[in-house]
Image (cartoon, rainbow, N blue to C red):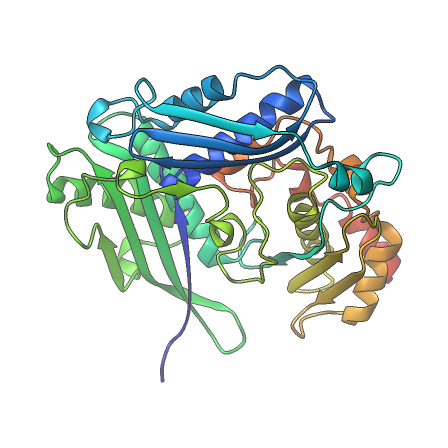
Amino acid sequence: MEKRLFTSECVTCGHPDKVADAISDAILDACLAQDPGSRVACETMVTTNFCVICGEITTKAVVDYAAIARETIRRIGYVYPEAGFCADTVEILCKIHTQSADIALGTNDAVGGAGDQGMMFGGACTHTASLMPLPSDLARALSNRLTQVINAGGELRPDGKTQVSVEFGENGSVIGIDTVVVSVMHSAAFTLEQVRETVLTQVIAPVLAEYGFKVEDVANIHINPTGNFVIGGPDGDTGLTGRKIIVDTYGGYFSHGGGAFSGKDPTKVDRSAAYMARYMAKNLVAAGLAEQVQVQLAYAIGVAQPVSVRVDSYGTGKVSDEAMTALLRRSCDMTPAGIIRKLDLRRPIYGRTALEGHFGNSEYPWEQTDLAPVLKELAGI
């Protein structure tokens, strides 16, 4: 019988697209630190020793965008000239203008409408302690651990990718890990054998152990399967803000509305409502109302209340999906202003999400489960 596998991938903060995300979110944080009411939609492109920053920013903050970009690149680890993309030598071009007056009209404090139309999804399940799907959570853990090893010094370089295939039973239970793939950039001085030994012993083995698995339990492990990975980062591939939206959410396990997160202030529901949908889904699962939940929100530009709210528990709910939807409507303010207040989103907290991931970290406000007791009481469970 063919295995039931689901695969998710992740990338390190040195991946070109993540470098672009990190710069955009660092600029957002710099604006919010001085002016919490900043309106930011910042896009970044990076390639061989070149960085372009563009978008719409309306703020009272005085920000040196180029300096922030350079410092972000330095923090990620591109500090050596042979990388073809170096914090000290990269050329930076800024093309920033203010937010459209038409958009501002519908999203100002008096109106409080959504910054755009669109749908956003949030999900949660009982695979892991963080209530994230195991394939994406494990791929993220491997990626973050890989970054830690890179930052500790040595011959590994910032650009890297991870991928995990998990085998599931017919009832959706986790059977085991079928395949782990890790690719990481390295110096020319580091042999392929050295790369593979380092990644296996310092990255894969300890992360698997944290999740209760052993290297011997994994049927297939591939480390730098194409061989050398010396040319990488923005020198090897152009990076753009917002191209890793599946990595940023649930690895494809739950749906994605299509809107990226990085570089956007919380009036943009692409970001804030996706965080709120995760908060609501996680609290439904934490309350014991279902083993797996997806929440969808949808908005119209300039309109405060969502045009639709939907809960799908995939048949695992202890109450109906309609009942859970009603519970969320009773207990949550889903307007952009309400979401911002509840999750305290007008703070410089976004740079870390670009570097380490948006979901699964208990330190983020949208990962708290303070709503679970309320939902449980309202449901009568």
At a point 20% along the width and 36% down the height, the residue shown is: 186
Closer to the camera in the image, 168 or 209: 168
Q: Is residue 176 placed above or below 283 in the rendered structure? A: below
Closer to the camera in the image, 121 or 201: 121
Q: Is residue 51 placed above or below 282 in the rendered structure? A: above
Q: Is residue 369 placed above or below 24 in the rendered structure? A: below
In the image, farthest residue toward the bottom: 1
Percent position of residue 181, x then y: 29, 55
Considering the image in quadrants, where does the C terminus appear?
Answer: bottom right
At a point 18% along the width and 45% down the height, the residue shown is: 196
Residue 238 visible in the shown view: yes
Query: Going by the image, does 254 lie left or right of 198?
Result: right
Considering the image in quadrants, where does the N terminus appear?
Answer: bottom left
| Number of callouts | 0
Closer to the camera in the image, 284 or 256: 256
> Picture quarter containing residue 118?
bottom right
Percent position of residue 157, x then y: 26, 33
Q: Is residue 11 placed above or below 41 in the rendered structure? A: below
> Picture quarter containing residue 167?
bottom left
Percent position of residue 198, x then y: 21, 39
At a point 43% along the width and 51% down the height, the residue shown is: 138
Query: Going by the image, does 126 lie left or right of 273?
Result: left
